[in-house]
Image (cartoon, grey):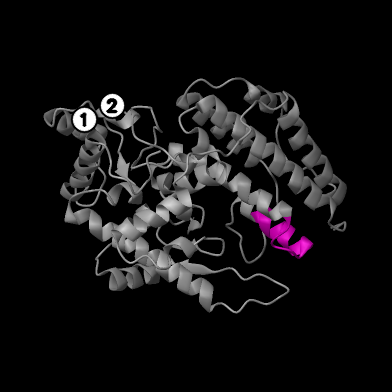
């Protein structure tokens, strides 16, 4: 079986080089598929076939990355990128800087993990802020990457994407390395070591079983309804302001395209946005789900409670929707796809929607359990 560190087939190596060179010529922006197709044709290769034949490993990881997914040809104007695993095989010097930067980031994350002195009774969150991290990476790797360029690398790698957090202003970002597995990368010093570390972390065919079967038709409606009843039992007022739960029930119908998937995510997000959660005085502009997180954290006194983590799941669902409809939020898509396990079925929109519904139902049930654990807080 081909490993990440093994040489790529000639057509795949050519594809990687063309995309990487396009990135260099395009001032650090990944090229569109039409450009790649033309350059591959000039080199004597069928770009679509080369893309379809690329090897894939855990999390559908491969040498390239695009919104379209493995085996699905991007549109002419869709951008296509090269992963760190692909950059490690690129022939140009341009790619080497990005590999060194990724390795430097992993080394800095490992240092942060080693220097912490945790308390035996509580965990500490290990977070690196974007701008200082970029400066440290550039110094260690002898590169000159921008904040956006390093963010673009980390958010597309399944190893690192889940820890990326961006502020609502989309200007600043941070990287939570609390759960990051760095051991395979700590002794890596060059590109070959980096590829070997990727082999250890990702270089097996994906055997993870993700339940992508449809949920029972009434499950989503019941989950919303039960959460609303629990909220009313504590606060004596409705949480959801949905006129007809039949709107929710209709979301279970089959999905046959990216457009339908996006519209369902929009409808689901619209329902979530109807939650009436009082704003906290110190966060009057917080969004609906963030207000819910603050409310439950205050009352449960446990920021690791399953209900709090479940709110994070719903925030990932909203991120999937926002990334599809708002270009300024596109950077949030990959972390959300990884967190929801959508990367395992990328491009299969029916299975993707089934997973979103299943994750949403599970999250709503956990939040309901958290609400019922609160003491009544009467006005």
Mark 2–mark 1 CB contact (< 8 Å): yes
Give the residues drawn in magenta, as a range: 291-305
Q: Is residue 3 visible?
A: yes
Element type where label 2 sits in the image = helix
Residue sitting at x 28%, y 30%:
50
Neighbour tally class for label 2: few under 14, some 14-19, many 20 plus, Cα within 10 Å: some
Residue sitting at x 13%, y 32%:
43
Residues 228 and 105: in front is: 105
Element type where label 1 sits in the image = helix
Look at the image and tell me in which quarter the N terminus lies: top left
Q: Residue 37 shows which numbered tag?
A: 1
Magenta highlight: main SS: helix
Look at the image and tell me in which quarter the C terminus lies: bottom right
Q: Badge 2 is on which residue?
A: 48
As drawn, 313 above or below 171: above
As drawn, 107 above or below 31: below
In the image, taking residue 6 as reference, residue 123 lies left or right, namely right
Question: Where does the image place residue 232, in percent across and percent down from the top left?
Answer: 83, 45
Q: Is residue 74 visible?
A: no
Question: Where does the image place residue 2, in percent across and percent down from the top left?
Answer: 37, 40
Distance from disc 2 to disc 1, alpha carbons, whole Å, reads 8 Å
């Amino acid at each position: 079986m081909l490993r990440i560190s093994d040489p790529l087939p000639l057509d795949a190596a050519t594809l990687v080089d063309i995309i990487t060179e396009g990135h260099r010529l395009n001032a650090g922006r990944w090229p569109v598929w039409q450009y790649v197709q033309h350059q591959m044709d000039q080199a004597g290769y069928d770009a679509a076939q080369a893309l379809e034949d690329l090897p894939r490993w855990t999390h559908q990881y491969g040498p390239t990355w695009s919104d379209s997914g493995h085996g699905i040809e991007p549109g002419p104007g869709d951008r296509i990128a090269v992963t760190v695993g692909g950059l490690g095989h690129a022939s140009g010097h341009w790619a080497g800087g990005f590999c060194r930067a990724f390795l430097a980031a992993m080394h800095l994350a490992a240092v942060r993990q080693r220097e912490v002195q945790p308390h035996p009774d509580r965990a500490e969150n290990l977070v690196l802020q974007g701008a200082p991290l970029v400066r440290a990476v550039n110094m260690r790797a002898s590169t000159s990457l921008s904040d956006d360029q390093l963010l673009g690398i980390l958010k597309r790698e399944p190893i690192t994407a889940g820890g990326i957090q961006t502020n609502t202003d989309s200007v600043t970002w941070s990287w939570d390395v609390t759960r990051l597995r760095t051991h395979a990368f700590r002794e890596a010093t060059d590109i070959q070591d980096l590829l070997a570390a990727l082999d250890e972390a990702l270089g097996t065919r994906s055997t993870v079983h993700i339940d992508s079967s449809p949920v029972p038709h009434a499950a989503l409606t019941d989950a919303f309804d039960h959460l609303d009843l629990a909220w009313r039992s504590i606060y004596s007022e409705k949480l959801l302001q949905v006129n007809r739960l039949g709107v929710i029930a209709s979301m279970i119908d089959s999905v046959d395209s990216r457009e339908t998937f996006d519209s369902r995510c929009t409808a689901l997000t619209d329902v979530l946005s109807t939650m009436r959660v009082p704003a906290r005085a110190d966060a009057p502009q917080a969004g609906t789900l963030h207000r819910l997180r603050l409310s439950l954290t205050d009352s449960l006194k446990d920021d690791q409670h399953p209900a709090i983590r479940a709110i994070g799941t719903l925030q990932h669902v909203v991120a999937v929707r926002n990334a599809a409809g708002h270009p300024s939020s596109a950077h949030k898509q990959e972390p959300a796809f990884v967190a929801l396990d959508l990367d395992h079925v990328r491009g299969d929109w029916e299975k993707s929607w089934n997973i979103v519904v299943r994750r949403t139902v599970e999250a709503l049930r956990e939040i309901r359990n958290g609400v019922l654990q609160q003491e009544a807080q009467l006005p």
